[in-house]
Image (spheres, grey):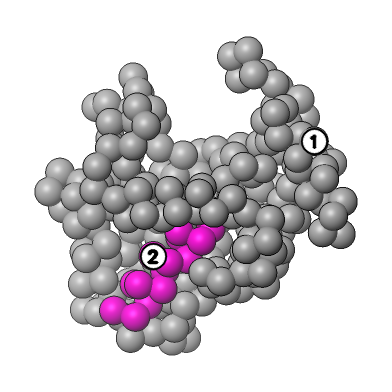
Amino acid sequence: MITIKAKTPGKAWLKACKTVTEKGKHIKDDDVLLKEVIDLFLEIEQAAEKDSIIKKHGDKKIIKWMIEENFYGSKSVLNWGYCYGLRLRNYLGINQIDKVIEKLNKKPESKSATIVTMDPKVDFSGHMPCIVALDFKIREGKLLATAFFRSQDVGKKMYADILALGKIQKEVAEKTRTKPGKLKIFISSAYIYETEFNKVKELLKNVN
């Protein structure tokens, strides 16, 4: 496993891009070529919404779509048949965010404030969520958040995922009267598509 530690989402994104670019192995997903690193772990000190690197180099449309329509939306996106907002806040009629907040307020030391996003009845034959689970823990007055990704598009969308997760972490922290702590992300398959190779190389060249 490769571990990346960074203070901000932007720095975590750049380090992940560099890691996959330099250490990734070429594989094919159907007919699409990509570079992949297996088991990448990110530890971000503060997943704040404002980030100078992402503001300058990120795609505002992707960020807006990811946060407003995907993570905080209430309608299906693309051809998935769902959005993360539905899985998080209306999963079989259950608002999992509220349940996590309720559990942590009742028992701050809880080890089971965990959200799942998969629905095995439909996901194995359709689009399987990239984020499989979110976990929250209050330790030493801070809300720690951990996300497990089965896979993540590092080059094109990682930064938007981090900002969206950071927003959720902040929301849960406020409603549990804590402060956001580290955001940790485990990615089983971290990859960059061939179509993004040159763009990522230019990004690393210009920022570094």
Residue nearest the observer in this picture, 28 or 74: 74
In the rendered structure, find residue 168 and report the number of the disc placed on it. 2
Q: Are marks 2 and 1 in contact (CB under 8 Å)?
A: no
Q: Name above or below for residue 136 compared with residue 194.
A: below
Q: Position of residue 132 (x, y in %)?
A: 41, 44
Q: Secondary structure at mark 2?
A: helix
Image depth: mark 2 or mark 1 in front:
1
- Dominant SS in magenta: helix
Instruction: State left or right for residue 33 relative to residue 84.
Output: right
Residue 19 appears anywhere in the view: no
Q: Residue at x 43, y 66 (%)?
A: 167
Q: Which residues are magenta?
A: 162-175
In the rendered image, which quarter is residue 50 located in? bottom right
Q: Name above or below for residue 70 compared with residue 6.
A: above
Q: Which residue is mark 1?
A: 198
Of the two numbered discs 2 and 1 on the same chain, state the one appearing first in sequence: 2
Q: Residue at x 78, y 50 (%)?
A: 203
Q: Is 174 covered by the magenta stretch?
A: yes
Residue type at mark 2 is Ile
Q: Residue at x 16, y 53 (%)?
A: 94
Q: Is 172 covered by the magenta stretch?
A: yes
Q: Position of residue 57 (x, y in %)?
A: 68, 56
Residue type at mark 1 is Asn
Q: Secondary structure at mark 1?
A: helix
In the rendered structure, find residue 180 and report the number of the disc placed on it. none
Q: Position of residue 144 (x, y in %)?
A: 47, 71
Q: Residue furthest left?
A: 93
